[in-house]
Amino acid sequence: MTGAPAWNTFERRMREVCDLEAVGQLLVWDEQTYCSKRGHDTRAFQQAALASLVHERVVDGAYGEIVDELAESPNGLSREHRAMVRVVKHDRDRAVRLSPELVRALAAQGSRTNAAWEQAREERDFNVYRPELEKMIALKIEQADALKEGDERYDAMLDAFEPGMTTAELEPLLDGLRSELVPFARRVLEAPAPDDAVMRQHYPSDAQWDFSLEVLRELCFDFDAGRQDLSSHPFTGGPGPTDVRLTTRVNERFLPMCVLSTIHEAGHGLYEQGQNPAYLRTSIGRAPSLGLHESQSRFYEHVLGGSEAFWEHMLPIARRYFPTQLDGVDLTEFVRALNRVEASAIRVNADEVTYNLHILLRFELELALIRGELAVADLPEAWREKMTSIVGYTPKDDVEGVMQDIHWSWGELGYFPTYTLGNLYSAALAEAMSADLDIDQAARSGDFRSILDWLREKVHSRGYVVQGEDLMREVTGRPLGHEAFMRYLTERYTRLYGL
Amino acid sequence: MTGAPAWNTFERRMREVCDLEAVGQLLVWDEQTYCSKRGHDTRAFQQAALASLVHERVVDGAYGEIVDELAESPNGLSREHRAMVRVVKHDRDRAVRLSPELVRALAAQGSRTNAAWEQAREERDFNVYRPELEKMIALKIEQADALKEGDERYDAMLDAFEPGMTTAELEPLLDGLRSELVPFARRVLEAPAPDDAVMRQHYPSDAQWDFSLEVLRELCFDFDAGRQDLSSHPFTGGPGPTDVRLTTRVNERFLPMCVLSTIHEAGHGLYEQGQNPAYLRTSIGRAPSLGLHESQSRFYEHVLGGSEAFWEHMLPIARRYFPTQLDGVDLTEFVRALNRVEASAIRVNADEVTYNLHILLRFELELALIRGELAVADLPEAWREKMTSIVGYTPKDDVEGVMQDIHWSWGELGYFPTYTLGNLYSAALAEAMSADLDIDQAARSGDFRSILDWLREKVHSRGYVVQGEDLMREVTGRPLGHEAFMRYLTERYTRLYGL
């Protein structure tokens, strides 16, 4: 089969897989929002049945021949169509290289390791977790060996989340960040921390919810193509760009929890809603990488949502929802409280200065694990050492240490660095944006449309036509580094902390 | 393949199909509740992709051989396992008999007829609808000819919703009902109608919602295995018995809308939640027919929810939510207002006395259409005549006449009678239940658990092990007739209307 018939067959299958994956995303959303307590067990069967069907469609040999043929002879295909083929081939090649036995073993071990993790946390005993995590790491090494194209196992891990990125690029990038961020964070942490009592008053949950919806409207989130619900861990998902599902959570005793979660997820959601309609239901109607996706959430949450200009516009709005709590509160003090920096145990609660320190240690540890340079048995001690030397905090036990994250239980290695890449990308994007528009001025006047339009044109509408790093190089005019992020942090915290 | 290997292969595929169908049900629920305005177009693709996969799994030839083999040599299979095979074979045989072309043509014509129906309603012109409905009826005749086993096309329509029921049984059953119901309804309609002003006060929507949840709790709906949401057309769906999704709707100017919708759907939902856990994710973990399902909703809504005993318990509860509206309202007057009978144009708004008259005329018309005894062009006039002679109301145009329902646009013939079967079953069940417990006494004391336990044992937990009619014969000790329903109506409305 060649030419148009091959393309037509390819397109039909690609769209079918996209549609079914979208269904899978809806199942995940529903499970986190409205699934009944007793519905989770059967939901797992439903998800497994769907995933196995999708896998079967993807690895089908006849489809593979067409994909390979179109990839080898792309004459006559447009740039976008070539990209669709490239993305499908990338994902398909990964799927084909894994034996069904290994896929099943990884899924089953994921459940077991997760169960052991929960029990170990309850008993505060790493040894309950250790044997199952050892099995998981062994399977991940087997998986990496099946997938990797060169010598570096970690490349195969990264490739699942940040296609195109290699360990050889990432390691020096993060080393560079570490060499500047660790001393900078020390300077900030040694300065007197701002008082955040204003954030810790009682903020009724209904008013927080209503305020979060108003913030979404301000940021131009399109409620005809999405919605917000509650879940215990905020995320962005749902069945595609025309129906984007954000979630947030509310803490009545800590205002930033809800509003910052909403702003963060809005960044993800606006990215999804900004996908080119022509790419809908294709393999390129999505972000090229998790890091790039995270760049949007972090741009909105930190660069924008942590700025004084943003709150110059938003604080008067917040006062309508919380008149007594925010009466007479000074803008600068509010923003200082919002950006309070603290060395702490738990990554997900960390501020933007120390957050990436938590990531750096995870990256170093998971790299050593997958390279076979670190044994699981030595992990708790290695964690404690790195926490102390990198974050400047010594965890009191393994629950607030090595057992705080769920990712490794599910075999998610290569995922953590995308959070930091998101920060690096977001600062680089902000510098590029500043050449075209005054971000603070736009925020101050509530003109979030201009900011969104810029991101739409430069990033969102571009989909997955090119890889994340290439897209960023095109937009920022330079390769990814840690410099823009450090300039951003230094500028903001020098001012906020009067360093 | 024989014996255990055949069974294992069968069971795996059956469960997979059940799981995927459950996913399809979740998609439908989501579309009616939380799907974004712009998400509906892509949702249609997602549903089509899933449906086509399920169809492919069901009609797969190797699976068919195993199903036929187990059906022919069921030695060693338990009664339940035989039933699983029987149900799968029934559904599979229907699926296999239809060519993929006809399935696609029916789906495509459904969309077109539906679009024409919407336009024709807007322009109030049946001729806009007629050509597309003609094509749909022609396709339904083709479908019936492909499916039917004897001479009667309508049997194949019925078989989709009420397996085991034949036209030869149904026609005399409904004729018998008609002969008694038409004159009885006339007597009721000639009596002075109760004043229902009490229902038409302003009832705030939040309070109605909260009251409806309390009613669900009273009726023993399990919120660990289900939930209630809002939708414009109330329904019960969702991904299975452990996660049952009810919906209701609220009219602030008419109290019965929300509470009766909730009670109706609770009947459906309690049936689902009462499925035998051993049948979960199998072909028999569901009601044997739509009529039987409807018997539960109608039992709860009418037999129970329309009774004075029910409101003796529930009115004091309602007063807590609507203290000013219901202050001093007399129980008997409230129940009379709730059961107000009126000859009217629209089926979905009809009371329980006239409701089945609306069904009888639809049954007679769709039977004539599929038999080729009535042309679509003559439908509006036939509708008007039957409305006048059966319901006693002459529609002022085709919008409140033949174009009021969406069912025929989608090719749903054979569906309407299941509503009436639901009423007949519900009254027969109530008589059987009365032999074991005093329903009024249970309702009066809020002991809805006893009522539910009886239904659980006799109906809910039985799943689809036997067909609906057989199950009913077992429970009531006699074949289905219209007598119990007429006794029930006569008793209730003679008293309420002082006939």
Image: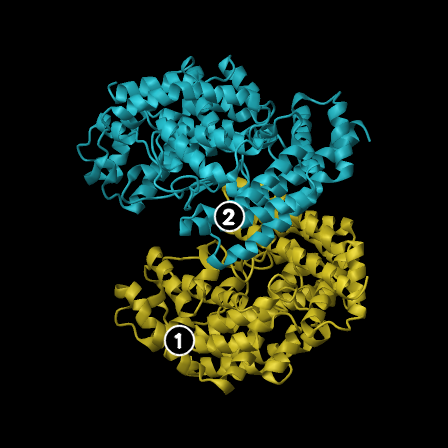
Chain colours: A cyan, B yellow
* Secondary structure beneath label 1: helix
**Residue B113, position as x, y percentages in the image:** 65, 49
- Kindly identify which chain the residue marked by label 2 belongs to: A
**B72 left or right of B164 in image:** right
Which mark identifies residue B67? none
**B462 left or right of B499 in image:** right
**Residue B388, position as x, y percentages in the image:** 57, 68
Compared to residue A202, the image places residue A150 above or below, namely: above
Quarter-wise, where is residue B280 in the image? bottom right
Q: Residue at x 39, y 18 (%)?
A: A180
The residue where tag 2 is placed is A114
**B463 left or right of A492 in image:** right
Quarter-wise, where is residue A433 in the image? top left
The residue where tag 1 is placed is B310
- Kindly identify which chain the residue marked by label 1 belongs to: B
- The total number of labels drawn is 2
Marks 1 and 2 on same chain: no
**Residue A190, position as x, y percentages in the image:** 26, 24
